[in-house]
Image (cartoon, rainbow, N blue to C red):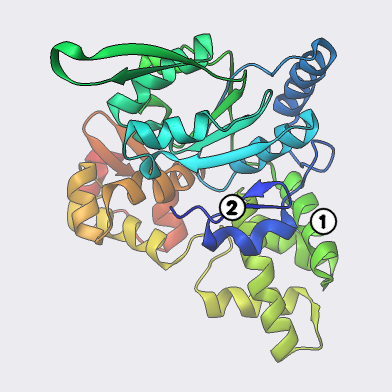
Amino acid sequence: MKNTGILNGYYHAESDVAEAALRPRSLKDFKGQKRLKENLSVFIKAARERKEAIDHIFLSGPPGLGKTTLAGIAACEMGTEFKATSAPALEKPKDLAGLLTTLKEGSIFFIDEIHRLKPAIEEMLYVAMEDFELDWVIGQGPSARSIRIPLSPFTLIGATTKAGQVASPLYNRFGITFRINFYERQDIVSIILRSAKILKVKIDDDAVDLLSLCSRGTPRVANRLLKRIRDFAQVMGDGVVTKEIVNLSLERLGIDRYGLEQHDREILKVIIEKYNGGPVGAETLAISVGEPIESLEDFYEPYLIQRGFLKRTPRGRVVTPAAYRHLGLRIRDEDQRSLF
């Protein structure tokens, strides 16, 4: 992921720049995740009153739910500097050292995809997080010696879609841990209305209701769909997003009423048609649908499971009767064994 700097207090990869205007900058403007916001507000207020850096924060959850946004909000609420990177960008210990030694007191340092840190970099973080020092080796062989370089007290915010792949020694050094879940439909409605106001899009209530239903409980998806439907409303309508325009747009985009796209439906159909409804292993399924296993597990499966169309079992992935009904398929005799 290429670091393109800080924009309006937030770090963005090139593909994320267009999202900057829609990202909230305060907990008050952040919709949904009520309990998380209430607790984070307490921790931030306590740290500010003590004039200390807030404790290290661990954020986990599926993509698009606001982990990067929450990290940026924490920096804004603390009134401090925000620096960010991703684990794949940290190739050598000197890359991490270069970032840590430039942090100011109280700075928030955000690492996305933290489960992908290399072992040597991860071990360097242990000392930095606990003692605010950098353990650095000078020289080689018998003459090598280790020195401790002091760091300004900072807050590390680590984000991941795979909490189970984060090493226990690293995870245990985070004092605050949050799991971000899919959003309730009413929260998605609030997000769509806020984004429509920022984008100056006129949208009917019925259109908002329909759009919230097919946004996969994910703010990123809701905002992406809103911007594409805005295009259809501008070119094929009078600029107002109506229920009819939403239905037309979703049909053109291949998205159904539950937010499933063509590839989501293809995953379910492959399990049904090639593997009698399952179980089928993740690697086999990934090859069958032409997707990396990481994309399958991180992007497609969480929502299919959350909607009740797919189950993970010890033997593999299994579709549910709800998936058959949604796809308009009949449960065959050979499928019965895996489903019931």
Between marks 2 and 1, how big is the CA–CA gap? 26 Å
Label 2: which residue?
5
Looking at marks 2 and 1 on the same chain, the residue that comes earlier in the sequence is marked by 2
Q: Quadrant of residue 106?
A: top right
Indicate whether 131 appears above or below 206.
above
Neighbor class of circle 1 (other Cα within 10 Å; few <14, some 14-19, many 20+) is: some
Q: Secondary structure at mark 1?
A: helix
Compared to residue 289, the image places residue 175 above or below, namely above
**Residue 213 position within the rendered picture, expressed as x and y whole percent measured from the top left:** 66, 56
Residue shown at 55%/19% (left/top)?
151
Query: Within the image, what quadrant is residue 181 found in?
Result: top right
Q: Give the residue at x 53% y 56%.
A: 13
- Seen at 25% across and 28% down, the residue is 314
Q: Nearer the viewer, residue 127 or 243?
A: 127
Direction from residue 260 to residue 28 in the image, left or right: right
Foreground residue, 285 or 68? 68
Q: Is residue 134 above or below residue 165?
A: above
The residue sitting at 42% across, 67% down in the picture is 262
Indicate the position of residue 338 as horizontal and vertical percent values: 25, 39
Label 2 with label 1: CB-CB less than 8 Å: no
Residue occupied by mark 1: 194
Residue 179, percent across and down?
Answer: 57, 27
User: Which mark's residue is nearer the viewer, 2 or 1?
Assistant: 2
